[in-house]
Amino acid sequence: MNDEQTLHYTRVDSTVEGGSHFVEAEIALAEKTLAAGVPAMSVGGMPSAAGVSFLRSAGFDSAPHPAPARQWVVLLRGVLAVTTSDGEERRFGPGDLLFVTDTEGAGHTTVAVGAPPFEALFIPAGG
């Protein structure tokens, strides 16, 4: 698929062993006109449920934990270092999408990197 028509994101999934790991995934984008008089834009669906939350924190250094819910994390400000239970660490910054689905098991750790504040949107995905 044309990279301009694909939005890449990272998902944190549970493993069958009760741990977590990263999975690369993508959302297909299609050109759509959303309103009369507005140029067509690339649009893709992100499964979600009600209850989007804005989060601002002066710091973030978590113990290992599973995600409280299947949710999208949209980084707005700051950088997060996320480490899955298999030991892999990845960093996510403004504009990155992370889909956390590891709601059971050992989970992952999250640490804010750099100068605060850290800001993100949390979008519940349901199911």
Image: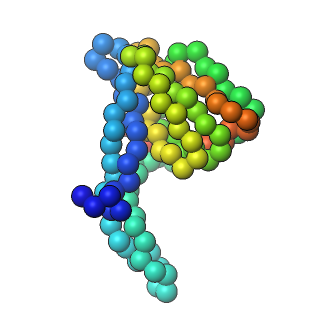
- The residue at the far left in this view is 1
Residue at screen point 35% across, 14% down: 18
Residue 42 appears in the rendering:
yes
Q: Is residue 6 left or right of residue 91?
A: left
Q: Residue placed farthest to the bottom in the image?
A: 37
The C terminus, quarter of image: top left
The image position of residue 103, as x and y in percent, is 43, 25
Q: Is residue 122 above or below residue 81?
A: below
The x and y percentages for residue 56 are 70, 39
Quadrant of the rendered structure where residue 44 is? bottom left
Q: Residue 74, how many percent across, how many down?
A: 54, 45
The residue located at (58%, 15%) in the rendering is: 63
Q: Quadrant of the N terminus?
A: bottom left
Residue 79, by quadrant, is top right
One can see residue 68 in this view: no
Residue found 44% across the figure and 33% down from its top: 100
Q: Quadrant of residue 58?
A: top right
